[in-house]
Amino acid sequence: MKAFLLAALTLASTAGPALAAISGDYVEARTSDVYTGPCFANSEVNLAGREAVVAWHVRAGSWQGVAVGGLSVAAAVRVHATLGDPFADPYPGKAVILVDERATPEQREALVGFAHEMAGGLLAEVVAVRPAPIQLEVKGAAATLRAGDVIDLQTRGLNHHDHLCGNEEVYYPPLTHVVEAVPAVTLEHAFRGEGLGMTWSSAGKRSAFVGRFALPAAVQPTDKPQPDPLETNPSANKALVSRYLTDVLGAGHLDLLDQLLAPDFVDSSPGTPKDAHGPEVIRTAQQRARDIFPEVEYKVDDLIAEGDKVVARYTVRATSRGSESSPGKPIEVTGITIFRIADGKIREAWIVNDQIEMFLQLGYTLQPPQ
């Protein structure tokens, strides 16, 4: 419950709808979890999260001088990569927009313009705009969206059963501009329409946000500079470190080094040569390590982010290379590393692993100095 409350508060804004020119309810869902931990998130990268539904119900207000209170607009979207992945650019999105069938032609044009302004590149390529009966009801984290016979979405609030790994947080931010939003679980999430080259059904995931939007008359979303999420979002920095530990050091995908490490990366650990810089240092070290330990697994136990640094505590399980007469020996040791992040890449690391315990598990003995 504490983690859920923190998640809700994380996305709450001090801005209110009292001065808004347009305000109302908002709901979205994608095909990957948004309230999750690094391990679950990494397992979905490039495999899920390329499809989404977004919808707005205007409670009061106007857009570009056209009154649209009481009307709704929704969109189904398909992009090129996992939405929210800081290491990929999913845009431009391809979208089908559904506009409240009660809207006049002028209101329809205003609602489409409003959706474009709110969602940006998510709606860059609109393949169709269609009128439809739209029902959008929001009560706390529970929302119901019906847009014709094309979009169905129903959500519920999080509870203790939704904490699967213990490291959950709001891993990805909402897809559009909101003043308040809470993560939610999809009871139903389906797109059955034409125009996107596919349909989908993705229920039972922690993949939704439910909340509200409010835009002041004098300030449009494009007037507000959007911060680089890699510089201001601790989750993005933690995702970077988690991917480095599990995919590079654990799974051995050394081809990712140039993507995750800065060209001037420095290993500032004690005993490391000071003239060793760049991803090639880690690549060489890992190739040598794989000769000794061909089977390696990194389990991330804790990630703490503040400013430009991430502290990782992890467990390493490995098996040394054996032979026909002598099987390899398994080891399990712990380590802590401090990473410094800059411009979306790891620029520096201070590594402390329990090497004494590793040698003891391999059968070595400690001899006191003579």
Image (tube, grey):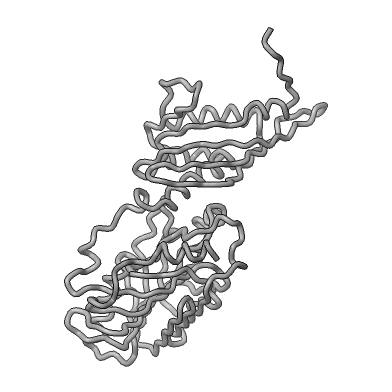
Q: Is residue 255 above or below residue 157?
A: above
> Which is nearer the eye, 81 or 219?
219
The answer to which image quadrant residue 89 occupies is bottom left
In the image, 39: left or right of 114?
A: right
Q: Residue at x 55, y 31 (%)?
A: 352
In this rendering, is residue 273 above or below 143?
above
- Tell me the residue at 47%/50% (across/down): 239
Farthest residue to the right: give it: 325
Q: State the image coordinates of residue 125 (x, y, percent, origin top left).
A: 32, 69
Q: Quadrant of the C terminus?
A: top right
Q: Nearer the viewer, residue 10 or 254?
A: 10
Residue 126 visible in the current orientation: yes
Q: Residue at x 47, y 80 (%)?
A: 143
Q: Which residue is at a point 47% across and 82% down the rendered structure image?
A: 144
- Quarter of the view holding residue 18: bottom left
Q: Do we see residue 53 in this rendering? A: no
Residue 310 image offset from top left, x and y in percent? 45, 43
Left or right of 364 on screen, residue 143: left
Q: Position of residue 6 (x, y in %)?
A: 47, 62
Q: Residue furthest toward the top?
A: 370
Q: Quadrant of residue 109?
A: bottom left
Q: Quadrant of the image for the N terminus?
A: bottom right
Count of numbered badges drawn on the protein: 0
Residue 79 image offset from top left, x and y in percent: 41, 64
- Residue 175 lies left or right of residue 41; in this view the side is left
Q: Is residue 256 above or below residue 74?
A: above
